[in-house]
Image (cartoon, grey):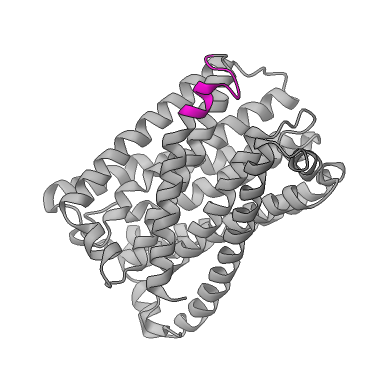
Amino acid sequence: MTLREKFSPTCFLSALGAGGLSVSFFMYLMFLVPHPNTPMATYDFIMPALLKGDWLSFVISFSLVFIIAFAFFHFKLLLWNTKQYNLYKKTKAYEDLKNSNAQITLMTLPLTYTMTINVCFVLGAVFVPGLWSFVEYLFPFALLGFITTGYFALKIFFEYFSRLLTKGDFDFSKNNNLSQMISIFALAMVAVGFAAPGAMSHNIVINSIGLFFSIFFASLSILLILIKITLGFKNMFEKGLNLEAAPSIWIIIPILTLLGIAFIRISFGLEHHYSSPVEITSLFILTSVILSLQIIFGILGYMVMKQIGYFEKYIESGEKSAISFALICPGVAFFVFGMFFINFGLTYNEIISKYSMAYFILMIPFIYIQIKTIIYFFKLYKKFSF
């Protein structure tokens, strides 16, 4: 299927969602498989646990299956979208896009390719024996990857903003949604990527480069949140939420997840090399604030989309909209940060015990959201027939 001028950069959200779902299943391994000598679960801890034949072996088994399955969908959709985008760039529709509000949707490219780096890192951690013995040699390449995606994210962002500031041609009549925040989503994704080597590297230079750029992109993200969420809600209050772009009201959920994880990683990175011990109570406060905001926006978004009939029109019916794939990211993000809240917010502070009944009961609502997200992903995948 070749779309050419009918293509939209928002189609990249399909690959992004698949990559996010792959990473989400790594959370089970990350938090349930003991890994005392490394900051994340790796092959050397996962495989012995898999062979034990207990309940954890079952969890590891289905996690590995879904990590591989959604990684496959991610790369398949990434290649499809990249091919379509290259054809789309040769059309007049692309030139029109670059002179409209929708130019910001080009940020889905660095956003998705940054997710690709994360998917590759997860696949390496899970399936490469002895990874941690040479991981320090990989961190510089990871930094180069994030520098590349960060450069293109900034390039698209500055081209867009400079055009608006010089020409003043922003169309406020079409801004009754939060789709402009896709730029913040991309910048936050780069920030959390840089925070990984910033938190885990034993080399202070690699550690410091990762921390600096993570703080740089996170700072820009927070600045833009203040601007764009204000403008978006102002226009929504005046005109109501745009039906097709309705999922954008949930975009703050993945942004909060990414910034939250970035700040947690930054905290551990500062503890690692800068003799700044992490105050575990601050992890409870940080994860609680972020989860609270996600719940508020989740309920608000669901109520609004239900009232305007979004799910009936763009999910249950045959009508297609690439923006509907934006529903996947909030579901993934809520599950992922739920796992961080339970493990870093509650377990670290000994509010609950790991592997206790309360521990697993608290996971249920987050797992439910993950399952619903998977169902929605396959409904949309089948509808678009990639």
Location of residue 378 by image quarter: bottom left
Residue 367 % position (x, y): 47, 40
* Residue at screen point 16% across, 50% down: 307
Residue at the far left in the pictured view: 238
Residue 371 appears at what percent x and percent y?
Answer: 44, 48
Position of 101 with respect to 240 (left or right) is right
Residue 354 shown in magenta: yes
List x then y, in percent, for residue 365: 41, 35
* Residue 284 spot, x, y in % from top left: 50, 20
In this image, 215 relative to 1: left or right?
right
One can see residue 235 in this view: no
In this view of the protein, which residue sits in the foreground, 349 or 214? Answer: 349
Q: Is residue 83 magenta?
A: no
Image-quadrant location for residue 216? top right
**Residue 86 sits above or below residue 102 on the image:** below
Residue 75 makes an appearance in the image: yes
Q: Is residue 28 left or right of residue 11?
A: right
Q: Is residue 87 above or below residue 39?
A: below
Q: Give the residue at the far front of this rendering.
A: 53
Report the magenta residues as a range.
351-361
